[in-house]
Image (spheres, grey):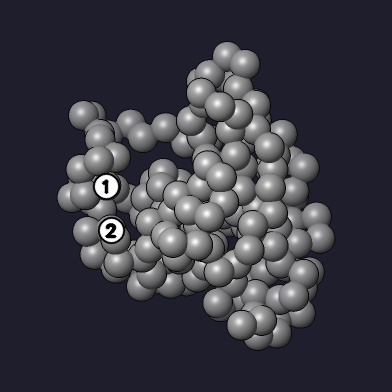
Amino acid sequence: MYQPRTPGYRKSDPAMRWNLPDRVFFACGACHILAHAFLMRYGTEDMTPLWLHPRSGFAGNHIVIAWNDRIFDYHGYSHRQTFIDHYFRRARQCFVGWDAEIKPIPRDVLISEEKSRQIDGLWLREPKQFLHDALPRAERFLDRFAPPPNTSLRSAPK
């Protein structure tokens, strides 16, 4: 879980949100756009978006891409259980009693507000609902990472 350290940061301020460094931007509210860009570039049949959905009353939603024993998010690649253990530990440092469900979600909800709202508790912005289109920013951010380890690169299912 990432907490912005920008003085006076407000997620509701589109300019302030857009002007965050890339890594922070994709950690704090645009993780689903990065997940979509990752699937478009590297997606294989066995890759699944996972939603870390905090229990009622807690913050800390996050979306990652998972396959085999791997996870991808703004950090890059992680071992799945190591990532989950770290995420939960960090969230519990911020919020006593924090807990979450880990839920697979359909790929098509990642960039559709309408489809995301059909899942109880999920409400995702579309790329163009940010101050500027977030998808090209996500595609550029992906250039920082090598292709995924331990997977064959096939086209993502449509």
**Residue type, mark 2 in image:** Phe
Residue sitting at the far right: 68
Q: Within the image, what quadrant is residue 44 found in?
A: bottom right
Residue sitting at the far top: 96
Identify the secondary structure beneath mark 2.
loop
Q: Residue at x 66, y 81 (%)?
A: 157
**Residue type, mark 1 in image:** Arg
Residue ID for mark 2: 130
Which dot marks residue 127? none
Q: Is residue 134 above or below residue 52?
A: below
Q: Residue at x 69, y 54 (%)?
A: 104
Instruction: Evaluate if marks 2 and 1 touch, with contact meaning CB atoms under 8 Å apart.
Output: yes
Real-space Cα distance between discs 2 and 1? 8 Å
Q: Is residue 99 above or below residue 62?
A: above
Q: How many marks?
A: 2
Q: Position of residue 55 (x, y in %)?
A: 60, 29
Q: Position of residue 151 (x, y in %)?
A: 77, 73
Q: Within the image, what quadrant is residue 96 found in?
A: top right
Q: 38 or 150, which is in the foreground? A: 38
Q: Is residue 26 left or right of residue 17?
A: right
Residue ID for mark 1: 17
Residue 34 visible to the viewer: no
Q: Position of residue 126 (x, y in %)?
A: 38, 63
- Disc 2: CA contacts within 10 A as few (<14), some (14-19) or many (>=20): some
Q: Is residue 14 left or right of residue 117?
A: left
Q: 93 or 53, which is in the foreground? A: 53
Q: 108 or 114, which is in the foreground? A: 114
Q: Residue at x 56, y 78 (%)?
A: 41
Q: Is residue 136 left or right of residue 67?
A: left
